[in-house]
């Protein structure tokens, strides 16, 4: 009799412990998904978006800002402006919007430096609108969305570095813009590097987890 009880006791304990073990296994699976699968999926999405050049006809080409030095665009900004000028010449949109504020001590803004550069390069001044607002992607595109809503424009071609496109498009679309992306194809910032992809994947995740709620409140007010 004693031996029978001893034989059954471990089995009974195993049965009682099995639900907890199943829960633990699921927790571990979810942790692994969060740590490995989600970042890899985000990185793949960022790269895929970076490689897609969308030439859909829109109302405006929007050039996201980058550093300028006393009115002279940095190599990154110059590459974006040159790309925007080629889109304008190819009739992708009838106008260009440059955007971006300034840093303490600057004598001008990224937006104005961008417009001046385009006009010197032969783009008609009437076809370029400078929006001198914003020191990051979210605040810059918020200002662009307000301008577009005021003008009745709904579609935009976003021009920036290829790896920056996925996050920029996500923000623009959340703000109500029918956004298409065309990343720079040459010059500074056009190379899809691993560190840039990692940084933008993290930024995109942060937008979806936190900033998107602020955008939704802004759009609905």
Image (cartoon, rainbow, N blue to C red):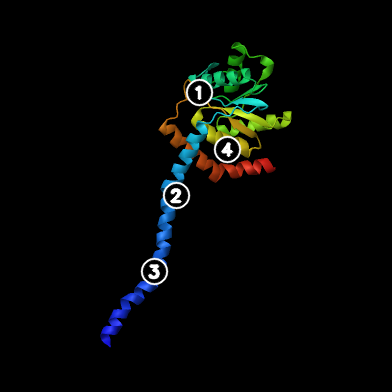
Q: Mark 2 points at which residue?
A: 34
Front-lying residue, 132 or 152: 152
The image quadrant that residue 61 belongs to is: top right
Q: What numbered label is drawn on residue 59? A: none
As drawn, is 15 to the left or to the right of 220? left
Determine the residue positioned at 47% across, 39% down.
Answer: 44
Determine the residue positioned at 51% across, 42% down.
Answer: 206
Label whose residue precedes the other's in the sequence (4 or 3): 3
Q: What numbered label is drawn on residue 185? A: 1
> Measured along the vertical axis of the image, is residue 31 above or below residue 7?
above
User: Gap between marks 4 and 3, in whole Å?
Assistant: 43 Å
Q: Which of marks 2 and 1 is in front?
A: 1
Q: What numbered label is drawn on residue 170? A: 4
User: Gap between marks 4 and 1, in whole Å?
Assistant: 21 Å
Label whose residue precedes the other's in the sequence (2 or 1): 2
Label whose residue precedes the other's in the sequence (3 or 2): 3
Q: Where is residue 81 in the image (x, y as percent from the top left)?
A: 56, 20
């Amino acid at each position: 009799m004693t031996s029978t009880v001893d034989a059954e006791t471990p089995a009974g304990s195993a049965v009682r412990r099995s639900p907890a073990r199943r829960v633990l296994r699921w927790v571990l699976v979810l942790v692994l998904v969060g740590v490995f699968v989600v970042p890899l999926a985000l990185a793949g999405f960022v790269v895929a978006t970076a490689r897609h050049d969308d030439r859909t006809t829109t109302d405006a080409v929007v050039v996201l800002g980058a550093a300028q030095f006393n009115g002279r665009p940095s190599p990154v900004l110059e590459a974006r402006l040159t790309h925007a000028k080629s889109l304008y010449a190819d009739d992708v949109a009838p106008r260009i919007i440059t955007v971006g504020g300034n840093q303490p001590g600057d004598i001008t803004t990224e937006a104005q430096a961008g417009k001046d550069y385009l006009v010197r390069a032969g783009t008609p001044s009437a076809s370029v609108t400078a929006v001198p607002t914003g020191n990051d992607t979210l605040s810059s595109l918020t200002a662009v969305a307000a301008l577009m809503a005021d003008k009745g424009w709904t579609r935009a071609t976003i021009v920036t570095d290829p790896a920056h496109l996925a996050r920029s498009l996500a923000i623009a679309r959340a703000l109500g813009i029918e956004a298409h992306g065309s990343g720079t194809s040459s010059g500074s910032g056009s190379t899809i590097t691993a560190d840039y992809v990692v940084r933008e994947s993290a930024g995109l995740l942060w937008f979806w987890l936190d900033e998107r709620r602020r955008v939704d409140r802004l759009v609905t007010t």
